[in-house]
Amino acid sequence: VTFVETGGESVQVGGSLKLSCVASGFRVTATYASCMGWFRQSPGKERETVAIIRSGGRTKYADFVNGRFTISKDNVRNTLTLQMDSLKPEDSGMYYCAIDLRPEEFRCSSGLATTPFSNWGRGTQVTVSS
């Protein structure tokens, strides 16, 4: 199970980006892919959860998202995507995707905690400038 994140770049405040996380070694629609997420980390800060998506398409977002981002799965391209609109300078950072591979009854049961997630990709850099 590996991920490659792409789509990050430098944009102006208020701009939009669509991040993609290509999955290898499994299908994002597989049963064991029932909990996946996007995360970000800025220099000097802890990695934080941006959004998670569970089986059935149920989603959960960090408070700072405030309706600006949308997490989804592209079954045709076998990717996890993050559409980001109305970007702010504080959204700058390295963005990663990962998966919760705990037993099914525990997946996505820890709120927005990052610790249950694994198989981190290398990340894609997002820079928002004013």
Image (tube, grey):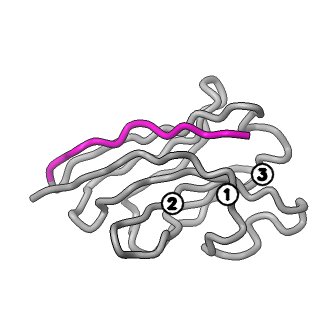
Q: Which residue is mark 3?
A: 34
Give the foreground label among 2 and 1: 2
Number of other residues with Cα within 10 Å of mark 3, as a class: few under 14, some 14 to 19, many 20 or more = many
The disc labelled 3 sits on which kind of residue?
Ser
Say which residue label 2 marks.
39
Residue under label 1: 58
How far across and how far down the image is residue 39, in percent?
51, 60
Amino acid type, mark 1 = Arg
Marks 3/1 in contact by CB < 8 Å: the verdict is no
Q: Nearer the viewer, mark 3 or mark 1?
A: 3
Q: Quadrant of the C terminus?
A: bottom left
Residue type beneath disc 2: Phe
Query: Residue reaching furthest left?
Result: 130
Task: Decide which of 89, 45 is in the foreground and name it.
Answer: 45
Q: Secondary structure at mark 2?
A: strand
Secondary structure at badge 1 equals loop
The magenta stretch is: 1-12
x then y, percent, for residue 117: 68, 62
Would you say residue 55 sits in the magenta stretch?
no
In reply to whether residue 3 is colored magenta, the answer given is yes
Q: Which mark is residue 23?
A: none
> Which mark is in front, 2 or 3?
2
